[in-house]
Image (spheres, helix red, strand yellow):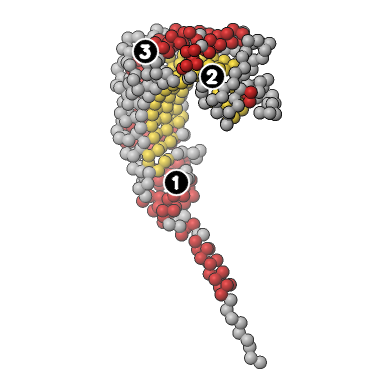
Amino acid sequence: MEQTIRPRDDTNFDYDKNKNIKLIKSLFENLANEILYQIFEYLDFYYVYNGFFDINKRFQDLLLSSTIPIKINTPNVSKSNFERYYENMIIPNKHRINLLCLSNPFTADIILSSPCIMSDFVRLETLILDNITAKNLYKIFLELMFLPNLHTLVLNPAEYVENATDIFSKIVRLSKLKYCKIKYQIKIDDDPLPNYFNDCDYSSVEHLIIDARFSYGSLNSLLYCFPKLRRLSIDCLVYSRYEDNESCPIRLLKSLKHVSLKLNLIKFNKFEKIAQYFFRYVEVLRISTHYDAAYLDAKQWENLITSYMPSLRVFDIHYDGFGSVNGLTYHNLIDRFTSPFWITKQCSTISVKNELSILHQRKDFTFYWQLDKEVCPYLQETNFNSVKYVHICSTKANKNPANYFPNVTELTINNCVEKLDDRL
């Protein structure tokens, strides 16, 4: 019997061929170098090293021969693992690193004890030193002056700082620096010692953040050394028993536009001096205080702004005075911020913690409303038609925010333990 030969099924053949092609293309090692580099950009460089360096020589070459800038973070790794990472990756790539974050004390020990010194990181733009010892901090400062591209510095010393003068005096010597954030601790019972910067150079820093207790008496001296400041933020500007440092001349800060201050035991008349000396060109002012009800005197603010802060367009003040004065008194004070000056200015947010907030023509609103008719019988209910964003911080929700903000498009709720109106 003659055997019938079935014709070849081209469909199955093409399917098998396509399947093989797909399998070949799905192998990670066959991806082009350009694609691999794009993938690496989405990963922390330590994990790229840990996952690919030991696969084969091709991946080692990829990690060592590229000219693409890299960011070096130091996650929670053991000292031995970091030493291996340092030898295999950091030293060979020191000319490529544009961001270096050292978050463990031993990382700085290893870097500073090796022949590869900080000044070899010629492309370094951002340096983050977290939990660094004072000994290593001063060693690193000696090297940083030779880095031509360093524009961002973040410092968080590990030990208590008795006097920050040495740290700031070294910061001002970094001639390319534009952004500096420093966080340090002093013993809570200590009165911050004054910092004198009379012998310091002039800093190039434009954005300065001090996340620490800083003496009011040192502010004039500090600002004199930072003539190019555009943004200033101090987390705790505290009054000190030491005499104010008024020997330093006053510098007019024409570039200073944004100021954020948390004030501790500083009376309004002391703050007035700061504003009169330094805030003539400030456009955005945010302050927080818990002392001296004079900060709620609308007439004093009107005189201060008119005379010394003519450029001000955003004014936020948060007063944490719950329990020190009855709510009715607070309301009477705050109600004066509804005068024609404030309505015309269209820039203000005035809030008392756990009490109330008022706002004039702002697009955002922080909602602290916790008063009712029994506590404050003169409370007026106003619609804020221009507000688009509302942030509710009250623990009681006896007012429905929807009644006040009919055009809001974004809502954030914190600490609201009572159920809000279903109509919200």
**What amino acid is labelled 1 in the image?**
Glu
Q: CA distance from mark 2 to mark 3?
A: 27 Å
Q: Residue at x 68, y 26 (%)?
A: 420
Q: Please tell me whether mark 2 sits on a helix, a strand or a loop.
A: strand
Q: Residue at x 37, y 19 (%)?
A: 281
Q: Nearer the viewer, residue 324 or 366?
A: 366
Nearer the observer, disc 1 or disc 2? Answer: 2
Q: Please tell me whether mark 3 sits on a helix, a strand or a loop.
A: helix
Q: Is residue 113 above or below residue 391?
A: below
Q: Is residue 17 above or below residue 289?
A: below
* First along the sequence among labels 1 and 3: 1
Q: Nearer the viewer, residue 322 or 276?
A: 276
Residue 34 at x, y = what percent?
Answer: 41, 53
Q: Residue at x 62, y 13 (%)?
A: 379
Residue 17 at x, y = what percent?
Answer: 53, 69
User: Looking at the image, can residue 194 be seen?
Assistant: no
**What amino acid is labelled 3 in the image?**
Tyr
Specify whether 144 is left or right of 160. left
Nearer the observer, disc 1 or disc 3? Answer: 3
- Name the residue carrying label 2: 359
Q: Residue 41, labelled with which disc? A: 1
Residue 102 at x, y = what percent?
Answer: 43, 35
Q: Quadrant of the C terminus?
A: top right
Q: Is residue 289 above or below residue 17?
A: above
Tag 1 near tag 2, CB within 8 Å = no
Q: Nearer the viewer, residue 249 or 352?
A: 352
Q: Quadrant of the N terminus?
A: bottom right
